[in-house]
Amino acid sequence: MSLRLIAACLLFAGIFSAPVLALDSKKIYELNAERVFQVRVLNRETGKKSSIGSGFIVGDGSQIATNYHVISQIILEPELFYISFISKDGQEGELKLLGLDVAHDLALLGADEPIGEAITMSPLPPRGAPIFAMGNPLDLGLTIAVGTNGGILNQTDDSRILFSGSLNPGMSGGPTFNERGEAIGINVATARNAISFIVPSRFLNDLIEQSTTSAINEATDLKNEVARQVLAYESNYIEQLLAADWPSLDLRRFKLPGIISPTVRCWDNSAKLSAVARYKRYQIRCANKNHVYLDGDNKFVGNLVYEYFWLESEDLNALQFYNLYENLNKDQIESKLNRDIVSNFNCRTWFIEVSAQELKSNLCRREYVEYEGMSDVLFTAALTGHSNQGFFITLIMTGVDYESTLPLVQRFLEQIEWKP
Amino acid sequence: METLILEISTRGLHRYQQIDREVTTIGRALDNDIILSDPTVAPHHLKIIRHADSKLELVNLSEINPTRVNNQRLSSVVTEKLPLKLEIGRVHAQLLPRDHAVADTRSLAGNGHGKNLFGHTYWTVLLVLACLFLGGMEFFLNSYNTVKWSDLFKYILRETVLTIGVFVLALSILERLLVNRWEIRQLITSVCLVYLLFNFVSMSGHGLNYLFSASWPTTWLHFGWYLTFIPCAIALYLIHISHIKHNRAILLAILIASPIAVPAILQSQHLRTLLDDFSPSAKYQNSLSAFNWHLKDSVTIDSFIEQARELTPGEFAD
């Protein structure tokens, strides 16, 4: 009897709740279907699409907002590609680039004449509130995805909202609406099923305002502009890191910098050893999440990774121990970029006194071919002078101004403490 | 009339024929005094007439591939000057006086008449044992887990015995083809010596890398090993053990060393280092040493940062 009652209640709830949700998303779709477009990068020679995304009308009605990564192809080859939009009804036209916010993955595009009514912007609704992402997934047509607001993510330097809904390729650059049909952000990325990310609308407002005073024009060197923005963002990020108090963490005989920023997450990365291993190894890997999309070749820069590795053994003799220790001391920057994108690394070796210990250290840098002043930096330092204890630290930063990283390396070394 | 000697060379091997008649005929037909079965030799190719006054007359009988004497075409020549170089078809020969000097006798055990590493079996056994010991040491130095004796034997069999065995087999077949002899013991001695030296050079390179905080020691040792040491070692072996003449030995050494050296050089990262070719990886000094001998002084953090400012940008590859 009670089961029947529960079933009846569920059916009743279903009948009355489903149309309410459908009505909301349907209404939002209908309200904005004429104001959300597919944004495409087309090859001038073939006339065919090279990449697609979504975009929506903002500002004075002739501007379209999208993601930087949707149109980034024109940065490297502006002569070969151009940007255009196409509406649900087939209305299309060429767009020019008005503004870029590379760090937050935003681009502002402009049509020759107004193409519709601009979508109203709004701040973020409360956490848990329903939000609606519109876009053109996989070139299949305009759709709307329903989800909830997961709040601003501090690990992304406050530049992303967690959207517990599904974004698919092609929806990037489309608007995310609140229940009133106002844009609270721009679709940007997805991690996996129903975990997606939105750029808060305040960054888009800043970009629209900025473009009224200093819009990009034909004379602008786009690569220089991208490099300038990325380097400014990364330098500011490093300054923020240096200004903060760093908590420490312990790894065997060392006291080390811990989670130095809310953007950083640390994980135990220790490898599982076999039962017959005659040594112990412990590894902590910390990495940030606020990466910056650079272009189709380079993908992301702005990585900050620091890794600590401890090795000890009571059973191995010094020669065996150092054989093992050396074999493990070979960290690299993971991205395998080719000669068209980056230079060779230039490395130099030092023996540095740190907390009364000696660290064999290497500092390496490589430069980006297309982006002046942008470097990847790799710093490693391995403990020497102990017959059965080894330790090394690896610090990696990508897409940064080399000089700006040195204070960070210095701070790391100064905060390393050997516990006798 | 003094008896003469005709030295006939075929593929590096010599046979000797006495010429003591007044008239000697040479050709492919079976009615000749000296029969050469080479297809480029005519049935009746050359006639040698010895005159009473010690003069020698050579008469060419073949229109096809006529005989050459001291590199000149011959129809007929009278001479008393020996030795004479002859080309009969493609067969090389020499007419020599009976008292023609011969080279010094070479010891089977190489120079020193047995008082060297190649002279006695016990040296070979000692070197093989040293190689096996080194193989075992390698195994222990690279064993970071508890090990079993069976693993040690497997490693030595796989890494040491197999490596030495393959080289000895390949080189002994080569030697058999070149000088028609088997000299297995001397080859085992040589390959073991090279194996021991190779490991010594590798370890030294690693130590020097750490000492100088640089990679040039291993780079140059690598090139020196394959481009100088290996060809020289093969040439010395061919001269002193296989008893091949110097010029030929050097040429053969280069030919034998090439299949070993060329791939080793081309595939090595040292070549890329030397050519400064592009690498997506940072080539930094990751070598670590239990002895911790290094020439660079330790610096303070401030001093390091000061010097780090001068680190020049990476160079773009062509």
Image (cartoon, helix red, strand yellow):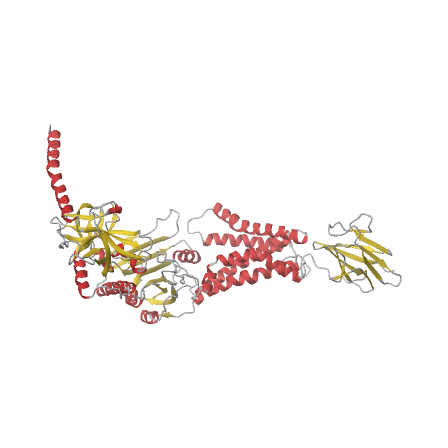
Q: Residue at x 48, y 57 (%)?
A: B267
Q: Is residue B240 left or right of residue A61?
A: right
Q: Quadrant of the C terminus of chain A?
A: bottom left
Q: Is residue B114 left or right of residue B131?
A: right
**Residue reaching furthest to the right:** B52
| Residue A70 is at least partly visible in this image | yes
In the image, B282 versus B199, the foreground residue is B282
Quadrant of residue A262 within the rendered picture: bottom left
Percent coordinates x, y for residue A345 in the rendering? 38, 63
The count of marks equals 0
Percent coordinates x, y for residue A28 in the rendering? 14, 47
| Residue A417 is at least partly visible in this image | no
Q: Quadrant of the N terminus of chain A?
A: top left
In the image, B305 versus A238, the foreground residue is A238
Q: Is residue A213 left or right of residue B160?
A: left
Percent coordinates x, y for residue A308 in the rendering? 32, 58
Percent coordinates x, y for residue A55 in the rendering? 21, 53
**Residue reaching furthest to the top:** A1
